[in-house]
Amino acid sequence: MAERCEVVARVVSQKGSCEAGHRVGDEFPVGDCTPAGMCSWAFHAVFPFASVLQFGGFFPWEDDPDKATVACPDSANPVVFELHRTNR
């Protein structure tokens, strides 16, 4: 089984009114369950991307192979998260 890397989701942009109260700078460790304080809708959006980073994958459209940028599904009040692999 592949070694699992740690991934942190950090809010890098928030427009409108986030019902969960997320603000730029908020950070959440991403695992198998929704982190305390993180909107479950946002978690479901970031989870597939976090899983790729956790197991050593990367996204060819990102400049940094240890990062991914993902937006929550609320298009009227988008919260954008930067996922960062903290260890390799």
Image (cartoon, rainbow, N blue to C red):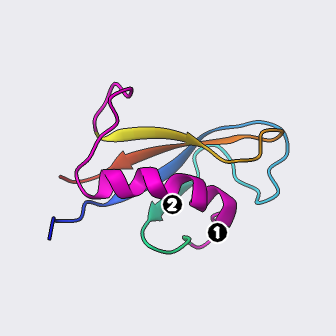
Which secondary structure lies at badge 1? loop
Q: Residue at x 22, y 51 (%)?
A: 56
Amino acid marked by disc 2: Phe
Determine the image quadrant of residue 16: top right
Residue 18 horizontal side relative to residue 32, left or right: right
What segment carries the magenta color? Answer: 36-65
Give how far apart the Cα atoms at labels 1 and 2 are: 8 Å
Residue 51 locus on image (x, y percent)? 37, 58
Pick the front one: 40 or 20: 40
Residue 69 locus on image (x, y percent)? 49, 37
Residue 24 locus on image (x, y percent)? 63, 43
Pick the front one: 24 or 34: 34
Amino acid marked by disc 1: Gly
Task: Mark 1 or mark 2: name the one nearer the start of the chain.
Answer: 2
Q: Residue at x 70, y 47 (%)?
A: 73
60 up-or-down from 45: above or below: above
Q: Residue at x 29, y 52 (%)?
A: 86
Can the viewer see residue 39 in this picture?
Answer: no
Find residue 37 and name its label: 1
Determine the image quadrant of residue 54: bottom left
Residue 24 horizontal side relative to residue 65, left or right: right
Pointers 1 and 2 in contact (C-beta within 8 Å): yes
* Mark 1 crowd level (few <14, some 14–19, many ≥20, 10 Å Cα): few
60 up-or-down from 46: above or below: above
Residue 29 horizontal side relative to residue 36, left or right: left
Q: Residue at x 25, y 57 (%)?
A: 55
* Mark 2 crowd level (few <14, some 14–19, many ≥20, 10 Å Cα): some
Can the viewer see residue 62 in this picture?
Answer: yes
Q: Which residue in the protein does label 2 denote?
A: 28
Count up the numbered dots: 2
Residue 57 locus on image (x, y percent)? 26, 47
